[in-house]
Image (tube, helix red, strand yellow):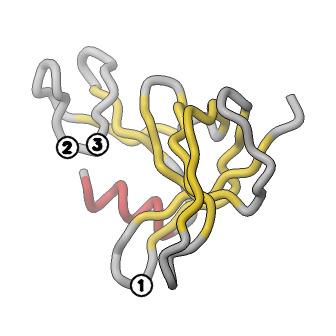
């Protein structure tokens, strides 16, 4: 399952593993349900969420604005191009993928709604 998850990220598609038996979300991604151990299947996820908190990094090569976003029942750490952010605001994932070193990344922007 993790391979399928990373394959979807390589394609720029954000999908989450859902249990085929009880419907629970397996996050972090797993081939088996954390509740009933049944297999999971990737499903398309909503691309919007709520910004819970954010911070600016000044580390050379890793500088930027990063935040914790609640998307349904999961939480994702992503980057933001905008510095005008507020906790509780609605945000949308605009891009996801894998870096050359295999690290997953998620990019968000504030939404107008």
Question: Whole-percent x and y of residue 38?
Answer: 15, 27
Q: Are marks 1 and 2 in contact (CB under 8 Å)?
A: no
Residue 43 tag number: none
Circle 1: element type: loop
Residue 28 tag number: 3
Circle 3: element type: loop
Q: Quadrant of residue 20?
A: top left
- Whether residue 77 sits left or right of residue 38 in the image: it is right
Mark toward the viewer: 2 or 3: 3
Residue 100 tag number: 1
Rate crowding at label 2 as few (under 14), some (14 to 19) or many (20 or more) other CA atoms within 10 Å.
many
Q: Residue at x 36, y 62 (%)?
A: 6
Residue 31 tag number: 2
Q: From mark 2 to mark 3, how far is it between C-alphas?
A: 10 Å
Rate crowding at label 3 as few (under 14), some (14 to 19) or many (20 or more) other CA atoms within 10 Å.
few
Q: Earlier in the sequence, mark 1 or mark 3?
A: 3
- Whether residue 93 sits left or right of residue 57 in the image: it is right
Question: Whole-percent x and y of residue 111?
Answer: 82, 39
């Amino acid at each position: 399952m993790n391979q399928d998850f990373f394959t979807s990220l390589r394609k720029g598609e954000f999908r989450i593993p859902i249990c085929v038996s009880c419907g629970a979300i397996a996050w972090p991604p797993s081939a088996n349900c954390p509740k009933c151990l049944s297999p999971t299947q990737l499903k398309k996820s909503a691309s919007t969420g709520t910004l819970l908190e954010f911070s600016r990094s000044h580390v050379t090569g890793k500088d930027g604005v990063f935040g914790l976003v609640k998307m349904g029942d999961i939480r994702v750490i992503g980057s933001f191009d905008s510095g005008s952010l507020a906790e509780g605001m609605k945000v949308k994932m605009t891009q996801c993928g894998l870096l050359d070193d295999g690290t997953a990344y998620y990019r968000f922007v504030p939404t107008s709604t």
